[in-house]
Image (spheres, rainbow, N blue to C red):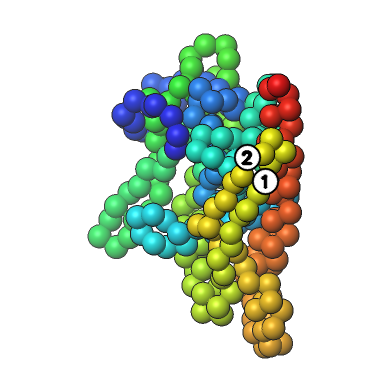
Amino acid sequence: MVGNRAMAENVMLNNVDHKNLRIITRRAQEYGDNVAGCVVFPTEFLEVHKEYPIYFQKDAETGQFQSIALFGFTHGENLLLDNSASGWVGRYIPALMGREPFLIGFNRSAEEVQPSKVLLDTSSPRITYGEEGEPVFLPGGGNTPFLEQIKKNLMLIHEGFPASAEMFRVFLDLDLIEPLTLDIHFDNGEHYTASNYYTINQDRLYSLGDDLIARLHKSGYLQLAYLVLFSLGNVKNLIDKRNSAHRASK
């Protein structure tokens, strides 16, 4: 994430120490939302594709493919941020951003690692104990709907990594991934080009035999491939926002 945040200190969330905890959910640069993109997972493609272009990208450390929802074109540029009450133009916030400032805590046993508790990043500027923000616990100590949604986001992320790995394994086995170059000229004369993205090879997808198409459909991967392709038109919305922002700054 982008931002000058202090070293994170993660503590176990509980309704005693954090009974009055509130979380500021408004999106803004001061909360670390000035990012040009975010990793997204197959289980949220249906929502993400309505709002943002989905590209594939190789992780710089592992070399493995991951899915990215694009918000802007340069480092620190998020064209979805605005001056509204929520601070965000889009109707859907990807889970990896929506879960902040919480993380999953794990129980480690001899057999497996399972998600157990919710951790709180105490360095987050979203944390408050005042009147602003969403309460995490009810007055009697129960979870608020906000915390329940956070837990859903955390589980989506936990399950999303292996789901992504399997999706890319299938796409690669069928040679469905191809490189993509973004080459954009903005109204102010600026030129943006990037060749580190990938997408679904539409011609290859259309050429698959009936048996393979049926298998992809049954497994859900055919829908995911089409959602990625359908999402690409959203890049025009980002271009329009970039052009509008430049005109407004004159």
Q: Is residue 150 visible?
A: no
* Pointer 2 local density, CA inside 10 Å: few below 14, some 14–19, many at least 20: few
Q: What numbered label is drawn on residue 185? A: 1
| Observer-nearest of 225 and 124 | 225
Circles 2, 1 touching at the beta carbon (< 8 Å) = yes
Horizontal side of 11 relative to 144 (left or right) equals: left
Measure how far apart labels 2 and 1 are at the Cα level: 6 Å
**Residue 21 at what x, y percent from top left?**
48, 20
Whether 144 is drawn above or below 231: the answer is above
Q: Which residue is mark 2?
A: 190
- The residue drawn where x is 71% and y is 79% is 206
Horizontal side of 41 relative to 223 (left or right) equals: left
The C terminus sits in image quarter? top right
Q: Find numbered disc 1 in the image and state the secondary structure of the residue it sits on.
A: strand
Horizontal side of 247 relative to 157 (left or right) equals: right
Q: For residue 120, which quarter of the picture?
A: top left
The N terminus sits in image quarter? top left
